[in-house]
Image: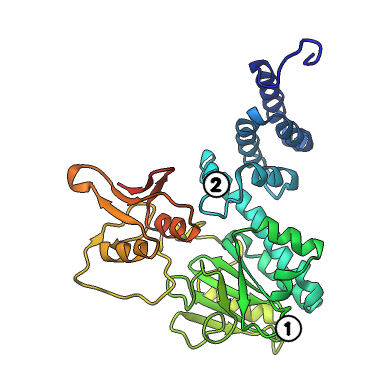
């Protein structure tokens, strides 16, 4: 019909046809709907003018299904169109509810776990990695974010698996220094109010740090895999150091016991997004009784004006406080910086593209 009537791709007729097909598929029961997802993904890729609205519709419908486990085609399409939802600058994800976004994040984090403990097993202890993958998958609902810290081998490898992993996690990778073997890597999981560090090579312990008191910066391009950072067991924010050795009980039992002491229990999630309730810091708390503190907004953490000015000064930004005149607190100009976006979002700021960041 399109060819015979010479209907252009930009016509409203094409948009209506695609919309009807998407909404028709989404009106089916779960089984029929899920069988149609590969075709829906192909349809939306072929019709860019409706792809955004169509993706919103399909994601919302998938979230309402009885089984929301990973769908590879839908997850790949979503990341291709909207970017990785783990990146702070992926604002197109605001078009769906936090619960829908969290569903896709869970898919991606599950994939991250599999990559680290499966793909990287060629360089590690395969049996140990299988046990670790199975163990941490039980805590998938608790994991709100994950970071790759790669050794020189994984960073420079031309192996197709490594190339694809680096591409799909662009902006989420930093370099591991002082990690021993060049084939060693680290994986940082944010679980509730803690950051848990696992290493790839056999013989490395697992470390748990208070997310509000880390001996390293999560946004750093390089992290040290020694006692000064990722293995800083004597640091005040370190909650435990555990090894993957079986003793009177299997190491999984010992890990589960320690995590339980921190209130982290498989299948029991107290908060899906820790960072909405706690302020993330990468250095010890410093109390300044004379510093004026901005009241904590509903979705952010408290901070002082001196602290804000010190942070943005490192990026040559400026702060404009228009609140006494009924306006907002602004940070200008708008720049593309993951570090700036991540910290200002933690403090409750919202971004206005082309202008800057504001807080009511």
- The answer to whether 268 is drawn above or below residue 330 in the figure is below
Which one is nearer the viewer's eye here, 27 or 213? 213
Q: Mark 1 points at which residue?
A: 202
Of the numbered discs 1 and 2, the one sitting upstream in the chain is 2
* In front: label 1 or label 2: 1
- Can you tell which quarter of the image residue 126 is in? bottom right
Q: Looking at the picture, how far across and down is residue 91, in whole percent? A: 51, 45
Judging from the image, what secondary structure is the residue with disc 1 in?
Answer: loop
- Indicate left or right for 159 with 85 as reference: right
List the single residue furthest toward the top: 5
Residue at 51%, 42% (x, y): give it.
94
Percent position of residue 69, x then y:
70, 50
Q: Mark 2 points at which residue?
A: 99
Q: Which residue is drawn at 27% across and 46% down?
A: 328
- Element type where label 2 sits in the image: helix
The residue nearer to you, when weighing 174 against 142, is 174
- 293 vs 280, left or right, is left
Q: Which residue lies furthest to the front in this view?
A: 316
Q: Residue at x 61, y 51 (%)?
A: 84
């Amino acid at each position: 019909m399109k060819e015979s009537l010479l209907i252009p791709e930009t016509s409203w007729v094409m948009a209506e046809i695609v919309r009807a097909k998407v909404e028709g598929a989404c009106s089916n029961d779960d089984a029929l709907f899920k069988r149609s997802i590969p075709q829906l993904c192909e349809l939306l890729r072929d019709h860019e003018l409706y792809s955004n609205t169509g993706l919103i519709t399909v994601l919302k419908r998938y979230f309402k299904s009885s089984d929301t486990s990973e769908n590879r085609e839908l997850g790949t399409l979503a990341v291709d169109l909207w970017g990785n939802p783990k990146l702070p600058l992926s604002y197109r994800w605001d078009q769906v509810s936090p619960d829908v976004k969290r569903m896709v994040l869970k898919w991606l984090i599950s994939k991250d776990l599999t990559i680290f403990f499966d793909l990287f097993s060629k360089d590690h202890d395969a049996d140990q990695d299988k046990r670790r993958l199975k163990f941490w998958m039980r805590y998938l609902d608790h994991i709100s974010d994950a970071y790759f810290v790669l050794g020189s081998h994984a960073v420079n490898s031309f192996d197709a698996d490594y190339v694809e992993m680096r591409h799909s996690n662009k902006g989420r990778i930093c370099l591991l220094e002082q990690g021993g073997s060049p084939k060693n890597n680290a994986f940082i999981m944010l679980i509730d109010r803690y950051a848990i560090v696992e290493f790839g090579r056999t013989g490395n312990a697992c470390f748990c740090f208070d997310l509000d008191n880390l001996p390293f910066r999560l946004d750093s391009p390089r992290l040290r895999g020694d006692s000064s950072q990722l293995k800083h067991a004597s640091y005040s924010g370190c909650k435990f150091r555990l090894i993957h050795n079986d003793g009177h009980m299997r190491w999984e039992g010992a890990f589960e016991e320690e995590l339980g002491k921190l209130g982290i229990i498989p299948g029991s999630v107290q908060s899906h997004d820790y960072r909405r309730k706690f302020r993330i810091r990468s250095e010890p708390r410093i109390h300044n009784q004379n510093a004026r503190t901005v009241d904590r907004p509903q979705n952010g953490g408290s901070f002082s004006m001196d602290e804000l000015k010190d942070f943005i000064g490192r990026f040559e930004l400026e702060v404009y406080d228009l609140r006494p005149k009924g306006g907002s607190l602004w940070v200008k100009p708008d720049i593309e910086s993951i570090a700036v976006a991540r910290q200002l979002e933690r403090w409750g700021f919202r971004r206005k593209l082309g202008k800057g960041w504001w807080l009511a």
